[in-house]
Image (tube, rainbow, N blue to C red):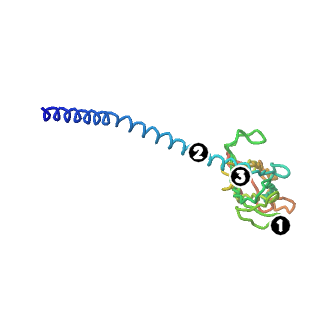
Amino acid sequence: MKHFYSNQINSIHQDELGLRNVRKEKGTPFVSFLTILLLIVFTTFEVNATNFIKDSKYQSQQTECNFELIVKGQNQQDMNDQSPVYYLIELQNNSSESITFSISVQNFSDFPENPGGSSTDSNILLNNSLEDADHNSIPNQVTVESEATLQFMVKLTASPDMEPGKWNGTKVNVSSNSCIGISKSALLHTFTSVPEGWGYVVPFKNSEKSKYSKQYFALASSLYIKADL
């Protein structure tokens, strides 16, 4: 009889243990879901915190980058007799630290119209270079100290076969690797003046008073023809 009750008790204990195991197994998916959810929350928080730090550094960097690009005098000139044209430019560093700038100069005609109202479709190209105030060549990378101003000149020259009576657009752009997303630019307009005698045949003589004593220009059949006399 005792043996019978002992077996019954052991059977009850085994059933209880089995029930506990079943409950644990049923609870496992919930625990896994909760673990995954917590991992997602912490990962998202970490990513947002990292981005906040990056944005804070970026904004701080942006605040330090304060500079101006100014054309001294007129940004429009005439090119006479194919002589070089010079534009004086100022680069002002108003930041609290020195900055190394990159200066680029390129032919540019992506604007509605020329100062005279003509279309930019027939604009010509001019050669360009950078010079200091003493007409010495300077590199396209320059360092300007804090609260300092650098003056430089953009020199524009024409090729020997330049077409007179045409416009040129030149864009000066300044940027820095220390100032992400910030750049300054200035637009220069140059008109190649029409030489003396343009539009009709010049008498066949070599006049010393003529600006073009060696070369005369004639216009024929809507084509530009240069006649050496």
Residue 27 location, x and y as percent?
A: 35, 34
Q: What residue sits right under mark 2 in the picture?
A: 49
Question: Pointer 2 and pointer 3: residues touching (CB < 8 Å)?
Answer: no
Residue at the front extreme, as displayed: 2
Residue 101 location, x and y as percent?
A: 71, 58
- Is disc 2 surrounded by few (<14), some (14 to 19) or many (20+) residues within 10 Å? few
Q: Residue flagged by tag 1: what amino acid is it?
A: Asp
Q: Residue flagged by tag 2: what amino acid is it?
A: Ala
- Is disc 1 surrounded by few (<14), some (14 to 19) or many (20+) residues within 10 Å? few
- Tell me which label, 1 or 2, sits earlier in the chain: 2
Q: What residue sits right under mark 3 in the picture?
A: 173
- Is disc 3 surrounded by few (<14), some (14 to 19) or many (20+) residues within 10 Å? some
Q: Residue flagged by tag 3: what amino acid is it?
A: Asn
- Tell me which label, 2 or 3, sits earlier in the chain: 2
Which residue sits at x=70%, y=38%? 112
**Separation of disc 1 and disc 2 at Cα?**
52 Å
Indicate the secondary structure of the residue bearing disc 3: strand
**Residue 28 vs residue 156: left or right?**
left
Residue 145 location, x and y as percent?
A: 78, 61
Q: Which mark is residue 160?
A: none
Depth check: give the residue in front, 221 or 186.
186
Query: Image height check: is 39 above or below 153?
Result: above
- Tell me which label, 3 or 1, sits earlier in the chain: 1
Q: What residue sits right under mark 1 in the picture?
A: 134
Question: On the rendered image, what quadrant is the N terminus found in?
Answer: top left
Which residue sits at x=32%, y=36%? 24
